[in-house]
Amino acid sequence: MTSTRATLLQVAERAGVSLASTSRALHGTGASPAMVERVRAAAAELGYSADAIGRSLRLKKTFQVAFAVADIGNPVYVEMMRAIHEVLAPHGYRVVVMSTGDTATSTTELVRSLNSGFVDGMIVSPLRTDDRLIREIQQAPVPVVVIGRALDDRGISSVSTDSAGGIGAAVRHLHALGRRRVGFLNGPLDTTPGASRQRGFDAATKTTAFDDVDQEIAGDFTVSAGLEAARTLLARGEFDALVAANDLLAIGAIRAVRELGLSVPEDVAVTGMDDTEIGRVFQPSLTSVSLGSTERGRAAARIMLQLAEDLDHAAQQITVGPELMVRESTGGAR
Amino acid sequence: MTSTRATLLQVAERAGVSLASTSRALHGTGASPAMVERVRAAAAELGYSADAIGRSLRLKKTFQVAFAVADIGNPVYVEMMRAIHEVLAPHGYRVVVMSTGDTATSTTELVRSLNSGFVDGMIVSPLRTDDRLIREIQQAPVPVVVIGRALDDRGISSVSTDSAGGIGAAVRHLHALGRRRVGFLNGPLDTTPGASRQRGFDAATKTTAFDDVDQEIAGDFTVSAGLEAARTLLARGEFDALVAANDLLAIGAIRAVRELGLSVPEDVAVTGMDDTEIGRVFQPSLTSVSLGSTERGRAAARIMLQLAEDLDHAAQQITVGPELMVRESTGGAR
DNA sequence: AATCCGATTGGAAACGTTTCCAACTTCGCC
DNA sequence: GGCGAAGTTGGAAACGTTTCCAATCGGATT
């Protein structure tokens, strides 16, 4: 908190050479060995290190990328953030975390803030989307990569997953186990994940023969909402299988099943989605559809890297396939 | 990705006034109403928004704060990050996440990187500390707030917690329940948390009468390491209480107990530490010592705010008390 | 030995903003 | 009606960096 930082000009004076040469010498391009030596020495004596802001202004590059999600604490996003950071940091990029807020409007505002030029790009996973948001993304002055919804037609880079197909995989898995009375526990339908998972469940139960199909919508994607919704659902009928739209809802569902004196997976098999650590650690460990959060984060970061380095790189869409991780909650091996 | 951003100079030309006046008008200080009106209109037409880099260069202020931890995915750090973001964002500060790496040396390097001036301050929670790191923190060109170890004597701002005392609370809780054969599951002793928790356990078991006291060190603070270490520990003796140094180790311990056909909490009561969501959701829900991650993050952010706004604000130390959250794993209410 | 070419160096401008300072206008008051 | 003060405005510098361009230097080639 005490020392004051040395500037390039001070290094130049100390080395007795021009500002231009000093910059070149440190940057390693087009300077004689003697010059490099001399400037290096001066820089070392002064403990010089280049000012990020000055450089950014000149280079028009911040070496920063924003990662924006609704809830920074959500395990899925945490996993993505970690992956993004792991990919970007070695390339000299810093990661700025931001919150989109719950609505499409607040997300739009955040994207608009890119106009102040504090990052070279943004990776965003909007909870809700509308046309204004899409437009704002298209007009953004820096590359934007969207995680969570395919936007091929709009010239926007995106990394998506087939969560609908993932729900299908869970449904077929339960059917293959001989379960015939399946209940679905979804989150709010006006969210992107809620909507697509609903589509997936409807499609899967249409093409597969079940004796009973029912569902209930939880207030949000949490354990307590899942518990409550599962109670309601279980009060309406008897099920030997429950498909939950994410791991937390699945845990709530397991609670509700146990409250009735039934056991998982013997009486009721339960599947989750997102393959979170919390589900892996839970007992019984959760059979869960992995949507590859880490892989999606990594893919988004890689796209961002290309876009940031090569400004007229074309937009790019990637889809990461879902993968069913079978564990104890449907009778799989530990 | 298309439009090119407008500059203040362009706004000035459009409004037909000087650059200086334009800046003042937008900034709201010392400009006539007519001028403000005129400039505002021009700015709106051009969709102007101030460039963060240019402003930073002039103001010598980035409106960014770094948050650096060893593992961004660790629930405790996630909670802190969320709290920090919640405090700083409303004041216009962005949060940059960084990784300290495992060692004191890599952490020192990260602190040194503050010399490039890309943030107004750093909140850091070092896994390991040494004198060089301390010195680097003292010499940093921007405020640094340390979470995790009291550094009162060194003029460094810090937010710490009494994890030793927290372990003591867990030990006394178990004793009060009538448990007399207690095992301790700790993580690596050369980490800051490992060392202080060890102190806490030693102190508590010295002043309280137990029939049997033993312990085992896990390779790291994870479920699998906890499971393994707990197996070793349980093979050495019979315990009716296990104190774990964090929630993940505690879950590993519960697994190990169950493997022996024993149940939690009836046969063995288990306590964790950190009060993570994963522990709250687990069954049985974990009795855990909260070290107030959210509160610590919030406190650190508040200190940072003061330090960043008022540069010769004095260093500040805060301690957040531990709190025992009694739940099912020691027989508490659900 | 004169010339040319490549390698190296320094001067200066530019990135976009804020603010100091001086100059100007306007108004009130004597 | 003139003078001063208060209120507005514009010019210019500054923050720290990189890079274009011109100038200089050395050596090699004719």
Image (cartoon, coloured by chain):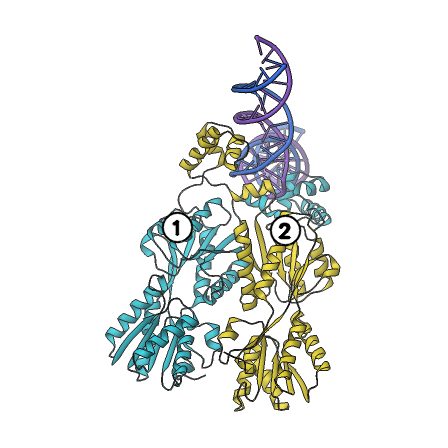
Chain colours: A cyan, B yellow, C blue, D purple
- The answer to which image quadrant residue B47 occupies is top left
Number of callouts in the render? Answer: 2
- The answer to which image quadrant residue B166 occupies is bottom right
Q: Which mark is residue A43?
A: none
User: Dot 1, how many residues are within 10 Å of its Cα: few (below 14), some (14-19), or many (20+)?
Assistant: many
Q: Viewer-proximal residue, B216 or A318? A: B216
Image-based side of A312 in relation to B296, left or right? left
Q: Mark 1 lies on which chain?
A: A
Identity of the amino acid at label 1?
Answer: Ile
Q: State whether residue B23 is above or below residue B226.
A: above
Image-based side of A204 in relation to B30, left or right? left
| Residue drawn at point x = 55 percent, y = 51 percent | B93
Q: Viewer-proximal residue, B316 or C2? A: B316
Residue D18 placement (x, y as % from top left): 57, 43
Residue hosting label 1: A137
Q: State whether residue B102 is above or below residue A135.
A: below
Residue A246 placement (x, y as % from top left): 40, 71
- Provide the secondary structure element on which disc 2 rests: helix
Residue B263 placement (x, y as % from top left): 52, 88
Residue hosting label 2: B306
